[in-house]
Amino acid sequence: MGITEDCAKNFPNDPTIAHGVALLRRVPPKHFYFDDNLGRWRPSSAAFEDDEDGDPMSVYRQDLIEAEGGPIRRIMVGHEGYALASLTAGQVRSKDQTVHPDPLPEESSHTLGPKSFVFWKDRL
Amino acid sequence: MPETKIVAENEYGLAEAAILSERWLSATTLPDVLARPAVVTAAVEQPSLVLRRVVIRKQGPALFVEVYANRPMSQTFLKSVEAVADLLSLPPGWNSYSAKPIEHRSATQAIRLLAEFLKPSTPLPSVVPTVRGGIQLEWHTKGANVEIYIESSNEVSFFAEEAGSGKSSDVPLSGHENELMSWLERLSGK
């Protein structure tokens, strides 16, 4: 079973999450750099590497955070120096990957989503 | 965070030592952050650095990275080794998710690759930890993107692309060493 099929089975896509919903991912300081070619900061492909456990990456739904009246910075608390990268649910699905809600007691917007660095090559 | 120290030492055979010591001993010494002074090459292109030994060992809270080579090491190489050594103190979960600590063998492999492929004229790489305990060496300059992937399993591959033209490579390093060297020479402006 391929990664995408495996993901679809274990972490099925939730079609009620609109394509335009922004999915946020914390990026540690060691995972972004200034790209001379682009003339701007960008995340390293390493920020989008899959864990060894095969699970998709953790992201946070911006729409849920805002619906709860919470500032986005709540997912940055305790993570000084980190950046936030953003993908839309539609971008994730366009790579045959799923967007799967996974609320945690400490963060209701927690979602499982994109895998692998195909997004980096798309010039995140 | 535990202290990390780097020992950079040149190990010569007797004949080499006799020839090289006079030539290099008057050169610049390394910054104070290193455990001991060493001699640094001038900005003249030299043959590849050959590492005799790379030792990573813990002594109390301090971590020592010892590098022994056939000749004096360039500033570019030593700064890159410092960046590799810096990653060895990352704790589990260092990315705020479930990242593993960097494996010593990944660091050793990274240092060996730096010795093999880094010339004094090569731009400094970004030395990037991976969530699986590996290391990436990255360059994004001169219209090219070059990334060397050192997996925790010690498998090494690289990705390189030329911005705009669509020319790219995504291959295991083994058997493609010359191709990687060509990409890196391009970064040096050659």
Image: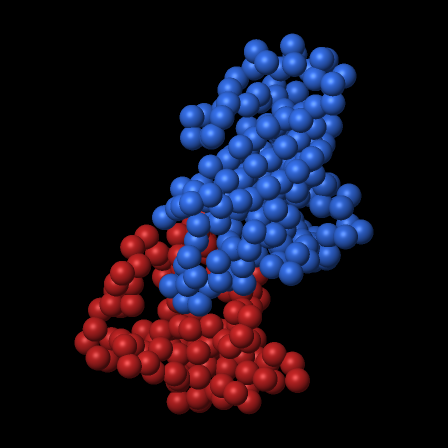
Q: Position of residue B178 (x, y in %)?
A: 77, 43
Residue A96 shows in this picture:
yes
Q: Residue furthest front?
A: B60
Q: What residue is at 56 percent from the left and 44 percent from the top?
A: B56
Q: Position of residue B127 (x, y in %)?
A: 52, 46
The mark total stands at 0
Q: Position of residue B69 (x, y in %)?
A: 66, 31
Chain identifier matching the red colour in the rendered picture: A
Chain identifier matching the blue colour in the rendered picture: B
Q: Quadrant of residue B20?
A: top right
Q: What residue is at 41 percent from the left and 67 percent from the top?
A: B97
Q: What residue is at 65 percent from the left and 81 percent from the top?
A: A2
Residue B140 shows in this picture:
no
Q: Position of residue B141 (x, y in %)?
A: 56, 42
Q: Is residue B101 left or right of residue B163?
A: left
Q: Is residue A20 left or right of residue B187?
A: left
